[in-house]
Image (cartoon, grey):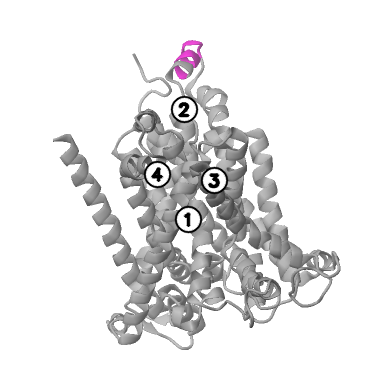
Amino acid sequence: MGDPIMKGKAVPHMIGLFPLGMMSLFFLAPLAFMVVVSFYERDPLGFYKVAFVWDNYSKFFSSFYYVISLRSLWSASLGAVIVVLLAFPAMYIIVDMSRRWQLFWVILLLSLMCLSEVIIGFAWLILFSENSGIPKFLGWAGLWEDPRSLSPSFGAMMVGYVTLGFSLVALMFLPQLARRDRSIEEAALTLGTPPMRVFSKVILPNFKAGLISALVTMFVYFLGVFVMPTMLGRPQDWNMTVIITDKAVGDANMPLGAALSVVMLIFTLIIIGSLAYASRTREQGERS
Amino acid sequence: MILVLKRLFICSIGAGLILPFLIVAGVSVNSASNISFPPQELSMQWYTQLLTEPDWLLPIRNSLIIAFFAGLIAVTIALAANYVLWRLKSGFGKLVFGLGLGPFMLPPIIIAMGASVFWAEMGWYGRAEATVISHGVFFVTLPLVIIARGFAALSDDVIEASRTMGATPWQTFIKVIFPLVLPYAITGYALVAIISVNEYLISYMVSGFAVETLPIRIFNNVRYGYTPVVASAAMGFALLTIGTLLVLSMFTDLLKLLGASRD
């Protein structure tokens, strides 16, 4: 039998050069440029001066950047954990709803996923404001004597994070949960196991890999958010992304912005690499 | 008891997701010139202002043009990468596909910073074309994953039947493969276009204030003192997003496209 579609593999290889070229030129090359520029010197009259200095990297180890880095890690981790803790059970409930309700939820989640950070941040800004939102309602209901604006604050920023990441994580769980084998759960329920116990002892362990993957995805995503910290957080809540943007665009210090981004890139690659290594080791362990 | 708890939980989640937009909608139809809720007197004046003032019209136009072309770039790359993986199933195919997954794995600021430096070096910093290409390349992961489902659903029997009936490879692609993956490609295009319209960080880092998009305009307004026009702009784009998804759901099986049911 010959090839079902095309004789030889020259044509698919040639077609493959297009996505390969586009991704190499406009995805990999910018990352490479960023690494190169991170060694350049700042030029107050332009973008940068060609040089080879380590100054931009040495600044990262000053207490200022060190503290912000730790803060970024903390807020991204917390946001990721909250999002996964909410999205997984929510999607578990949604996939057992009628088709019409599932479609409603999918459209709601997709709409939220597609909406700009700016619009979501703005919506919460209004909800947290003294004149329009939750504080006013609580004051009117007599539950808060002296209602004040709830933002900027760390809590408001976290709410923004969760709204931003919820839809993405929930949609990540959709195929896995919808297509899961329900017979084990049904067997456990038939044998009299309480539903909460089935959820914690049967379902959660089955989705361990998916949960970890969602946690890491969200963590990496939250490391790079800009709008929520600036809109809803206080300056002391700002993450590394805000500082990078501020240095690169606000202070026109591209080399420093690039160096800080490279540090973040290395950190991200270590996380992804560790995850890939851990899952490969686990697969090998299961096979043997 | 468990059922009540489930309903309470899911209703709270739904309320938390919908509430912010109800508030923005309320503010956008309030006649008062300051941001306040609930609306005292209904008015569409902020929508009129949004659609008549050049300060708002230009960013809207910029956002729509960038999204239109970014979607085309992303879907073309995704289609080609999926086709190659489906045909070759080799290291080369996997490499092309894997590269497409890359942007999704990195924090947005790294992508934005890289693009900013790259376009500055190329002399395209501040040009709409730079934002179009960056959006097209960086949002490629979504159509890539969605179109992959389309290729996975292709039956070998159909391809074999087409070949047996004398179709050339090109005819097989155009008449058999492409129509079958088209719904997936359209969904991928729509999602990239919607996300591009709403994207802030890359647009800002690549084009700055030279090519002002709607999210940049809204963000600047919120940061430096805002009027209810911002609410109407936010609401307008939220409605556009939801409307596009509703239309999409009428013509495609969204649940299947997102993997909620077996292909």
- Stretch of the chain drawn in magenta: B159-166
Residue B104 rendering spot, x and y as whole percentages: 42, 54
Which residue carries the number 2 mark?
A: B153
Q: Quadrant of residue A287?
A: top left
**Spatial distance from mark 2 to mark 4, Cα to Cα?**
36 Å
- Let me know if marks 1 and 4 both belong to one chain: no
> Which label lies toward us, 3 or 2?
3
Mark 4 lies on a secondary structure that is helix
Q: Earlier in the sequence, mark 2 or mark 1?
A: 1
Mark 2 lies on a secondary structure that is loop
**Disc 2 residue type?**
Ala
Which residue carries the number 4 mark?
A: A196
**Spatial distance from mark 3 to mark 2, Cα to Cα?**
39 Å
Q: Chain of mark 1?
A: B
Residue positioned 30% across, 43% down in the render = A205
Which residue carries the number 3 mark?
A: B4
Q: Chain of mark 2?
A: B
Number of marks: 4
CB atoms of marks 1 and 3 within 8 Å: no
Q: Earlier in the sequence, mark 3 or mark 2?
A: 3
Could you tell me which quadrant the C terminus of chain A lies in? top left
> Which label lies toward us, 2 or 1?
2
Q: Is residue A25 visible?
A: no
> Which label lies toward us, 2 or 4?
4
Q: Which mark is residue B247?
A: none
Q: Residues within 10 Å of mark 2 (few under 14, many from 20)?
A: few
Q: Which mark is residue B138?
A: 1
> Which label lies toward us, 1 or 4?
4
Residue A267 rendering spot, x and y as whole percentages: 30, 66
Q: Residues within 10 Å of mark 4 (few under 14, many from 20)?
A: few
> Which label lies toward us, 1 or 3?
3
**Spatial distance from mark 1 to mark 4, Cα to Cα?**
41 Å
